[in-house]
Amino acid sequence: MAAVLLISVNLRPGATSLGPVLQEVSAALGLDGSGAGMLTALPGLCFGVVGFVSVRLGQRAGLSVAIALGMGLTVLGLLTRVWMPNPWLFLGLTAVALAGMGIGNVLAPAWIKRHGGPRTVLLMTLYSAFLTVGGSAGALLSAPLASGVADALGQTDGWRWSLALWGLVAVIPLGLWLVVARRTGHDFPPTPPGDGPATLLTHSPAAVALTVLFGVQSMNAYVQFGWIPQIYRDAGLSAGHAGTLLAVIAGLGVIGGLIMPTVIDRSRTLAPWMVGFGTLTLIGYVGLLLAPVSLALLWAIILGLGSFAFPTAIALIPARSRDPHVTARLSGFVQPVGYILAAIGPFVVGLIHAATGTWTAVLIMMACSGVVMTAAGLRVAGRVVVDDELTVS
């Protein structure tokens, strides 16, 4: 349980802590709009690319060893990137840190399915909730810490110390997972009878729909992490206020993480929830376009409720698969492809904003993503099992 809690808390702050201080980071490193867009796109891109090899790494080293290796990369990247004067070195070491988090993203649900037994739903609930806690903490603390350090030390680069903090925090789960890996040994689940390379996950409509759902909600999450604070700041709010509103969006996901695994386990259909997620997402972005300051908190709350789609998609990976090996394969398919889709969003947002100078087109595009989210979610709303669709294929 401690291992699950600590890995989940450390899989998001390295990404979410950048948004509130993106303006300071860009100024210090000389990043233009496209460079900042690339930086905000890195989480989805790295999570996607690394996700494709994470299952193979887990097969070779074992789930626990691979997760420990991922935490090691996270610590290395987060502690070293902030001292790099060159923007490309900063981007490269950010990619190293995100690669480590990406390994944990893919393998943690499979680890829970493998070792959870009768406590799988409980562990998945804790994982989903504290994944969001970590993301919220990164957004909430980033700007205040940067400002506090700058004031205390009389420096202009307090953001470096603020971002480096998460590398120190990640040392704790690194040590714990090394202990877990020693106890479990090679713990990748064996291939079930009848499963083989011919049973591609693209043969499963549920797996494809879950990938689209995960990709669209991840795109929303990383656009929010990377750009929502800047949208609020451009509307006239302070960096601290913008970071707090982002933390509200991310923090409400904690509630979603706590309730959605149980809702999934006990519900015959998630259709009303899926419609609700998409509708709230659409309303939140339209509201942010029309009244970004006067009703700023309201739109943050609405977008936060729509972000319940994130813990839902995560929890559906073990919930819509039966065998731990299929869970590992499904996680290694849904998350990498989904994150590649998600990576496009923040980068396109940066390009659109640089070209237009306003957030209007961006917010309209993001509002439309709520419709796609609902359509994909309805396909996995029932109690479909990916293992059965692979068998039929």
Image (tube, rainbow, N blue to C red):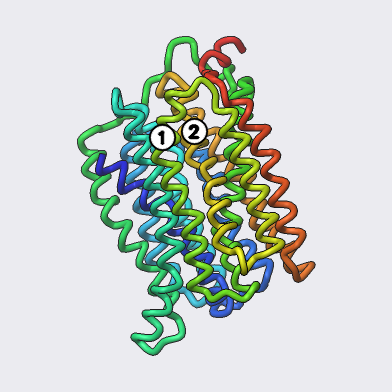
The front one of 372 and 4 is: 372
Considering every residue shown, the one lying at the far right of the view is 356
Label 2: which secondary element: helix
Considering every residue shown, the one lying at the far bottom of the view is 154
User: Residue 5: which quarter of the image?
Assistant: top left
The front one of 7 and 358 is: 358
- Please count the marks in the image: 2
Do the residues under discs 1 and 2 have CB atoms within 8 angstroms?
Answer: yes
In this image, 56 relative to 182: left or right? Answer: right
| Residue 70, position as x, y percentages in the image | 38, 48
| Residue 15, position as x, y percentages in the image | 49, 58
The residue carrying mark 1 is 109
In this image, 264 relative to 374: left or right? Answer: left
In the displayed structure, 164 sits above or below 70; it is below
Image quarter (top left, top right, bottom left or bottom right) of the C terminus = top right
The front one of 128 and 351 is: 128
Is residue 251 shown to the viewer in this render? yes
In the rendered structure, which disc, 1 or 2, sits on the residue that comes first in sequence?
A: 1
The residue carrying mark 2 is 331
Three-letter code for the amino acid on which mark 2 is drawn: Ser
In this image, 94 relative to 235: left or right? Answer: left
Q: CA distance from mark 1 to mark 2?
A: 7 Å
Label 1: which secondary element: helix
Residue at horizontal 51 percent and vertical 55 percent from the top: 249
Image quarter (top left, top right, bottom left or bottom right) of the N terminus = top left
The front one of 319 and 309 is: 309
